[in-house]
């Protein structure tokens, strides 16, 4: 206010020609300084306000705890002194005092369990129905609870449901909910909440990313939000039966991707129209859930803070709170070094440096992801002959590529079927060991046109290791006689060209195919051609189609292993993709975190956070 | 003067319109569309084709381009900037959350730049061709040539990790309530890094402006009438040499709302630069349009301000 009047006065004086230019400059300078300090104060106060609001909103919010090094804050005084010019104006002082008093009033109460800080990325949403990345979904699981959660080996484990029964032909799944689940607002969770969440996820108006995954539930295809969905039966308050149209032995894995199907509180959400759910403020600031932790605050682009849910229906977590910190990986490593950060996924290039830290260790474990190049089998005649595709694979020195890209943190993989434990690596596969001569022979047999170059496209969003891979591939394919040109594209453009089938070679990577063999059906079956599915290479083989169906139709693991082994052998001979390797997941973890079990899938760090403790 | 300002303001309306139309067309011409940018190929298929249709319908992307622009314009004029495609949150809220931190960081950087640049620029002009001048010139060249991110990462590593003097990232200590000192402590490194790079061109500019003024006749007169060199430099020369500098600073003002991507990302500073970058990556039209509109308005206003300031400060200039 004060500033505004003084500005008006100056302007008035100026217009009345009562003020000299010299005076104006002086006042303008003062005004600028004052404005800056006001802005600074506003920023500080705005944060204060947020905090207060949060405490009001959160049910039974605990006093703020402070686990970060206090010594650091104390050091501030002398450093800040140097910044004086900025807050030199007088009117600011009383307010500074206010801010400090507030500080005293909210003197942090040291919680018992301590806190853990984990590297994160800016989330798009905190509503599980709309998130399509695992890195967010693991936080959703911690806040809402999932019907089943996913363990380090990507197997389903009880969370909200104590157990699940599957019938023999894998068409009926019965979930037995725990009978003591309370939402954080004191309401009990029942099968009604589960039904509600499934129905909202399937309702097309909601726009949930789950709709496609759940389309195998009876009645899901035509469900429009009216009445009950026929495929969901709730015989009592704690039992939920899902009836599927087609047998689907991999359904639990489907339901568990990536951290688990979270259940929303019906009494909170039922009055909100499906189409309004995503834009509702609760999607960014969920207040009621049934997970082991509850949200304290999300500070845009900075961090998310969760605290222990003392009313959790299982043994409440030991840990007082978890911070999900949004940082560049390179800064993350710096914070790991100072001990500000406890857990992060390490880029391969940072492993060596991190290994030297005394207070942290590096964990490198096999992952369910693969690095691969899609070959346009169906829409590009040059690659229709399988000998050409085999030649592409023979022409690559896979161990060399793996060492260059992952610095030795990887495993050779020969088909997209390479796990989980019951499946193991199928036998009878051609290893396609590096053999450029063989590649050339095969190409000549197939009548390859050595004069016409082929194009390999990759994306600006590709990580460093994937860029290394495609660059070496280009070189080695060219050496083998297949001249290759690289095209770098924006993700959305590459995606469009991919689904239109307008490409030769398309480098992608990731996924979690090692978790369950049926996942790869999405990429190799004829009913998954784009836009309905992800078979961008338009690969088609009737026997492959049949085997994928058979694999879903039984829950007997021996039978499934046999089916998928045959599938892997066909795949390995037909080569619809070039698979380079399965890159390891690498974590940097400080030694103070106890009970952390590294998940093979990188975005599931929090899967057992409720069992962690810290030792300081 | 009043009429001049009014005329400039009226002219900026068609300019702004043209900017928004161009922007809308440019985004439309960019390859890909928001839906395919939103989803990972890994997940695209799992969601089913009708998911894409629903999204398209909900976002109004099924409408033809002129209709979409018309709707956007109508709503914007009424003060409704729309919803982000990516997370469906109101654009005004998303921008509101980031404007203040950006303003706070950039204003501090600008001040640090001035505090560094004015004395050094003056010093190197007064002692032209001396060792000091040489040193300042080299320093300015170094500051111009070192990329922000290098300075930022170096600062984090040396000052933050090795010496533990400053926090490595963020706007405040996590878990403790916001406090003035803590906020300033977190501001110190990012603002200094930015201030250092902003200072370099200013030093050069002040030096040459000062040199020009020092060779003016009235400076000679001041010296001749026996004024101390200090008084000559500060009272006569500096004041006048700062007039063009004010224009340069005024033209820097749009940066206050535009933010700076690299430094914001490295220091986990929730600013406009990061917002714009993410919006462009996701082809999030409403956010791209709104942020660019704000920046365009800021540039137009800053230009006007620069012109007005010039006339106010230099009596030889008159607009009619």
Image (cartoon, helix red, strand yellow):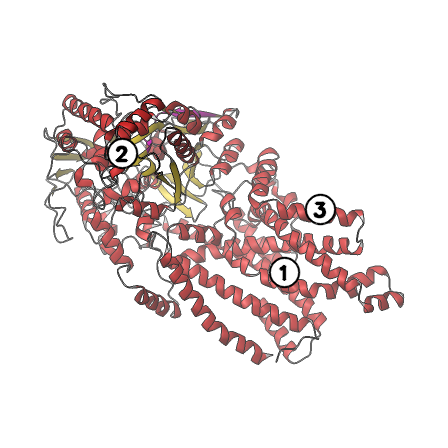
Look at 48% across and 30% down and name the residue there.
A349
How far apart are the alpha carbons under marks 2 and 3? Answer: 60 Å
**Mark 3 closeness class: few <14, some 14–19, many ≥20 residues within 10 Å:** few
How far apart are the alpha carbons under marks 1 and 2? Answer: 54 Å
Tell me where residue B53 appears, x and y as whole percent: 23, 53
Tell me where residue A339 appears, x and y as whole percent: 51, 32
Please tell me the numbered disc located at residue A149. Answer: 2
Q: What kind of secondary structure does the magenta stretch mostly adopt?
A: strand
Tell me where residue B286 appears, x and y as whole percent: 37, 59
Label 3's element?
helix
| Chain of residue at mark 1 | A
> Based on the displayed image, in which of its 4 quarters is residue B239 positioned?
bottom right
Q: Are marks 3 and 1 in contact (CB under 8 Å)?
A: no
Q: Are marks 2 and 3 in contact (CB under 8 Å)?
A: no
Please tell me the numbered disc located at residue A33. Answer: 1
Residue with the mark numbered 3: B138
Instruction: Please name which of the two marks, 3 or 1, marks the residue nearer to the observer.
Output: 3
Q: Is residue A100 left or right of residue B48?
A: right
């Amino acid at each position: 206010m004060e500033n505004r009047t003084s500005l008006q006065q100056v302007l008035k004086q100026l217009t009345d020609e009562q003020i000299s230019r010299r005076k104006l400059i002086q006042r303008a300078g003062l005004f600028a300084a004052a404005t800056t300090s006001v802005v600074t104060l506003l920023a500080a106060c705005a944060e204060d306000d947020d905090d207060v609001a949060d405490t009001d909103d959160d049910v039974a919010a605990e006093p703020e705890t402070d686990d970060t090094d206090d010594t650091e804050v104390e050091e501030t005084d002398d450093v800040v002194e140097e910044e004086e010019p900025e807050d030199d104006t007088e009117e600011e002082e009383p307010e500074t005092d206010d801010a400090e008093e507030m500080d005293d009033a909210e003197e942090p109460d040291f919680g018992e369990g301590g806190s853990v800080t984990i590297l994160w990325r800016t989330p798009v949403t905190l509503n599980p129905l709309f998130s399509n990345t695992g890195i967010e979904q693991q936080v959703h699981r911690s806040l809402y609870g999932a019907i089943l959660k996913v363990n380090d080996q990507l197997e389903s484990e009880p969370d909200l449901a104590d157990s699940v029964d599957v019938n023999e032909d894998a068409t009926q799944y019965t979930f037995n909910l725990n009978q003591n689940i309370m939402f954080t607002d004191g309401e009990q969770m029942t099968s009604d909440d589960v039904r509600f969440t499934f129905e909202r996820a399937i309702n097309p108006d909601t726009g949930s990313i789950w709709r496609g995954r759940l389309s195998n539930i009876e009645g899901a295809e035509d469900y429009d939000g009216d009445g009950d969905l026929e495929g969901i039966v709730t015989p009592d308050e704690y039992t939920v039966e899902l009836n599927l149209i087609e047998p689907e032995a991999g359904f639990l894995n489907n339901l568990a991707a990536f951290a688990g199907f979270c259940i929303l509180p019906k009494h909170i959400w039922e009055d909100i129209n499906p189409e309004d759910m995503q834009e509702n403020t609760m999607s960014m600031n969920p207040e009621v859930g049934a997970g082991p932790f509850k949200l304290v605050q999300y500070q845009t682009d900075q961090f998310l803070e969760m605290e222990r849910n003392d009313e959790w229906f299982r043994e409440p977590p030991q840990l007082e709170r978890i911070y999900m910190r949004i940082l560049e990986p390179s800064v993350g490593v710096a914070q790991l070094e100072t001990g500000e950060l406890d857990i992060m996924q390490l880029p391969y290039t940072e492993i060596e440096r991190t290994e030297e830290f005394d207070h942290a260790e590096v964990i490198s474990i096999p992952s369910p992801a693969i690095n691969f190049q899609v070959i346009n089998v169906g829409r590009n005649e040059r690659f229709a002959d399988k000998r050409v595709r085999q030649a592409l694979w023979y022409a690559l020195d896979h161990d060399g590529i793996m060492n260059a890209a992952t610095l030795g943190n990887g495993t050779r993989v020969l088909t997209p079927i390479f796990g989980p434990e019951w499946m193991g690596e199928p036998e009878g596969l051609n290893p396609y060991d590096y053999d450029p001569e063989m590649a050339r022979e095969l190409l000549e047999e197939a009548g390859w046109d050595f004069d016409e170059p082929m194009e390999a496209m990759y994306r600006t969003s590709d990580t460093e290791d994937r860029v290394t891979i495609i660059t070496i591939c280009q070189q080695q394919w060219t050496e083998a006689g297949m001249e290759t040109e690289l095209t770098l594209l924006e993700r959305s453009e590459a995606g469009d060209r991919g689904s239109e089938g307008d490409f030769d070679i398309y480098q992608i990577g990731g996924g979690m195919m090692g978790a369950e063999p049926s996942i790869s059906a999405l990429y190799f079956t004829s009913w998954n051609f784009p836009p309905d599915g992800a078979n961008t290479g338009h690969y088609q083989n009737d026997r492959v189609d049949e085997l994928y169906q058979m694999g879903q139709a039984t829950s007997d693991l021996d039978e499934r292993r046999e089916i998928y082994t045959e599938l892997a052998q066909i795949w390995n001979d037909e080569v619809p993709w070039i698979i380079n390797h399965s890159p390891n997941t690498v974590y940097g973890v400080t030694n103070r975190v106890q009970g952390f079990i590294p998940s093979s899938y990188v975005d599931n760090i929090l899967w057992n956070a409720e069992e962690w403790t810290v030792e300081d | 003067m009043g009429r001049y300002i009014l005329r400039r303001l009226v002219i900026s309306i068609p300019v702004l319109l043209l900017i928004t139309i161009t922007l809308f067309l440019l985004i439309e011409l960019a390859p890909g569309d928001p839906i395919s940018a939103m989803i990972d190929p890994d997940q695209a298929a799992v969601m089913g084709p009708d998911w894409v249709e629903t999204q398209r319908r909900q976002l109004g992307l099924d409408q033809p381009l002129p209709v979409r622009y018309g709707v956007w314009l109508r709503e914007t004029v009424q003060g409704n900037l729309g919803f982000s495609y990516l997370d469906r949150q109101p654009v005004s809220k998303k921008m509101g959350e980031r404007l203040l931190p950006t303003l706070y960081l950039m204003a501090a950087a600008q001040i640090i730049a001035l505090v560094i640049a004015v004395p050094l620029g003056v010093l190197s002009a007064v002692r032209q061709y001396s060792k000091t001048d040489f040193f300042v010139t080299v320093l300015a060249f170094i500051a111009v040539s070192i990329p922000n991110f290098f300075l930022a990462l170096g600062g984090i590593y040396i000052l933050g990790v090795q010496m533990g003097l400053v926090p490595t990232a963020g706007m405040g200590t996590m878990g403790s309530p916001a406090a003035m000192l803590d906020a300033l402590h977190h501001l110190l490194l990012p603002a200094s890094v930015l201030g250092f790079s902003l200072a370099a061109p200013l030093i050069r500019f002040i030096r040459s402006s000062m040199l020009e003024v020092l060779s003016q006749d009235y400076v000679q007169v001041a010296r001749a009438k026996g004024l101390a060199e200090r008084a000559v430099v500060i009272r006569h020369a500096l004041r006048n040499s700062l007039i063009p500098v004010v224009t340069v600073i005024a033209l820097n003002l749009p940066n206050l709302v535009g933010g700076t991507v690299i430094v914001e990302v490295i220091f986990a500073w929730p600013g406009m630069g990061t917002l714009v970058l993410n919006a462009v990556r996701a082809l999030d039209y409403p956010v791209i349009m709104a942020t660019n509109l704000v920046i365009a308005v800021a540039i137009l206003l800053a230009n006007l301000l620069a012109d007005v300031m010039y006339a106010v400060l230099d009596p030889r200039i008159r607009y009619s």
